[in-house]
Amino acid sequence: MDKMLSLEEVSLHFKKNGALFSAPEYFTALDNISLEVYRGETLGVIGGNGSGKSTLLRVMAGIFRPDTGTVDAGDATASLLALQAGFDLNLSGADNAVLSGLFQGYSRTDMEKTFPYLEEESGLGRFFYQPVRTYSHGMRARLGFTVSILLQPDVLLLDEILTVGDEGFRGKAEAIVRDRLRSNQTAVLVSHSLPQVERLCDRALLLDQGRCICVGDVSEVIRAYKDSIRL
Amino acid sequence: MTSESADLIANVDVAIEWGREAHRKKDWNKALERWSIGRTAFPERAVFSIRSLEALIELGQLESATLFLKEVQKQFPENPETLTLNARLCMLRDNHGDAEVLLKRARLEHPNQSAVWIQSANLAELSGDIALASAYFQEGERQVASPEGMFILHGELLMKNELWSEALVVWSKLKNLCPHLQIGHVGALEAERASKQSGSRRDTPNDSELGSLDNQSIKLTNSSNLKRSLAQNSLAAFLELVWVKALFGMRSEIQRTRLGYIWWFLEPLLYMVVYYLVFAVLMLRGEPDFAPLLLSGIIPWMWFLRTVTAASSSIIIGQSLLNQTSVPALALPVVEILQAFMKQAPVFLLLFVFIIWQGYEPSLRWFLIIPVLLVQLLIGAALGLFIAGLIPLFRDLQRLIPSGLTLMMFLSGIFYSYEMIPPDWQSIFLMNPMAFLIKTYRDVLLSTSSPDLFLLSSWFVIGLGSCVLISEVYRRFQHHYPRWLLD
């Protein structure tokens, strides 16, 4: 199969305390992780709190650079589905969409061409041109989601994004993501919801304290995770 | 009971079909009559009670429906439709709050019942949230075993609200699911035609192709119109980001004010009036040239202060952005520096007007103000970038900035001319770039003496050199910033 993104022996440590007169302590967020993401697959990442799931995604997105090891994405772009990142509440939905696009390297004119689509798809209608502070929480979530999903990278990194917004919107968001994943989109999904991982993913990876416990068939990995928490 | 009807209800299935026939035609009187007959014949079957209740509600007999509901609830406490019909009653009484509570419970307990999703969508539509209503239908369409009815209601809702392309998606799904149902084909055709008509108005891309595509690819074709016209991580992308973000930042700042852009003149004008009144009028500082001297010092200083303070905290303020996107850290302080610069333009215009009003002749020499502004921009930017870059590593630095800048203000000769300090100290005093720049502003605008062009060029080189050097350091440590911010 075609590799989209590969990690080789990636480790990453965070400094725990930064006071001047005490020796810094480190804590290992990722410990010698090697893995491949293949074209068109959806890889689920599961594990307890603090197991390094989000850090792993940020390494894949190129936001964190690992202390040792390499991340190779070739020419592919990988980015987090960053809902409402950098939203300015005083600006309109349209302006915020432009800003979100700029953060991912699109130009203002690229984004302006998508206004009719965004207006329609987000269900905001004329609210799209009103300041975001006048929106309800659900409307903000819809705008953030619709914009993010539009800025399609080659590898889509999803960090617990399907838990935002109201109940009705969550259903819609998951449906859109599912449509996306069924097509040829390559994606890595971090989720606490095991049924969700089961529904959406082709392969799964279990992390524990920064180490990769197992990777492979979704139901087997989920079983391993369930066993590990029962201990 | 007539003998004819007694014969008919000999079989439960026949009785149900008998009631359904009237129900489908929405002949509620007849439906109520037939369901009630069925209920007396088969009291243990919930369907007759539930449908009678529904017919009562549809007939608008809310009082008797409420009483009857209690009876049905007692007899069939487990039946999910007692929840949804109760919610329907609440809705008809405009009690949306209770209806939502009931439906929420119903959605949790009976997600495979279509009535649950239909009533939820109903309530959302009543509250004016069509998108939510549509989302409920979509959820229901996934959860319910035979969702045809829901598809039809969903499609009709979207058509009613002129959401043609979404309606088209729904009709095409129905078409695929139940090819024998005529309504799916008709609906799809109508939605397609309507979306074509509105498409020319709204300029929706690819609408004409929608008919030939299945519903899954619709979102993809629409969104794939988005093409990157800038190479990622290129200088062009960086400049576009900084420019638009600065522009939008200014728009955002004045968005909540009534006077809007007028504030860019008004605010500095008020400052100038205050300083003029306090120092030149109230304190009666003898010499008549004091007001222009003061303002030609305080205005460049205010710009410098704004540049450095805004830039230095920008990376801390923008940390969530740096943690979620690959925006380079350098962009954040540069945006602030650019904004401070743009806001300064009208202020300098006011300063020129004031100086002319005070009786100074504008001369060709005033054009020298352009290199002076440029040098100040570079010096302010260099200092702002430097501090902004260090703060994520040494947060304590943030505490030192206000006092440090105040010290620098008093050492820059804003309220006095550098000539007032002992001559031995003057050359050291002027090593402070802001002191030198303020002196040069005065040399140029108030013709106090000829500006030191050599020193100005030197500061230009130093400023430019530091900006380039610091940007390079940023670029090199770009990937460290998100982690430094978390450490």
Image: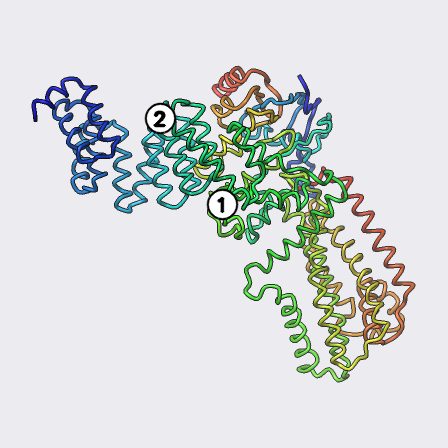
> Which residue lies under the disc numbered 1?
A124
Question: In terms of depth relative to the viewer, which is nearer, B47 or A144?
Answer: B47
Q: Quadrant of residue B439?
A: bottom right
Q: Tell me the quarter of the image containing the N terminus of chain B.
A: top left
Q: Amino acid at mark 2?
A: Asn
* Residue A134 left/right relative to B127: right
Residue A71 appears in view:
no
Question: In terms of depth relative to the viewer, which is nearer, A47 or B346?
Answer: B346
Q: Amino acid at mark 1?
A: Leu
Q: CA distance from mark 2 to mark 1?
A: 29 Å
The subunit carrying tag 1 is A
| Residue B235, x across and y down, in percent | 77, 44
Q: Residue, x 62% and y 66% (percent of image)?
A: B263
> Which residue lies under the disc numbered 2?
B112
Asked if disc 2 and disc 1 are in contact, CB closer than 8 Å, the reply is no
Question: In terms of depth relative to the viewer, which is nearer, A226 or B150?
Answer: B150
| Residue B75, x across and y down, in percent | 18, 28
- Vertical order, B90 against B106 (above or below): below
The subunit carrying tag 2 is B
Q: Residue, x 67% and y 47% (percent of image)?
A: B315
Q: Residue, x 82% and y 48% (percent of image)?
A: B468
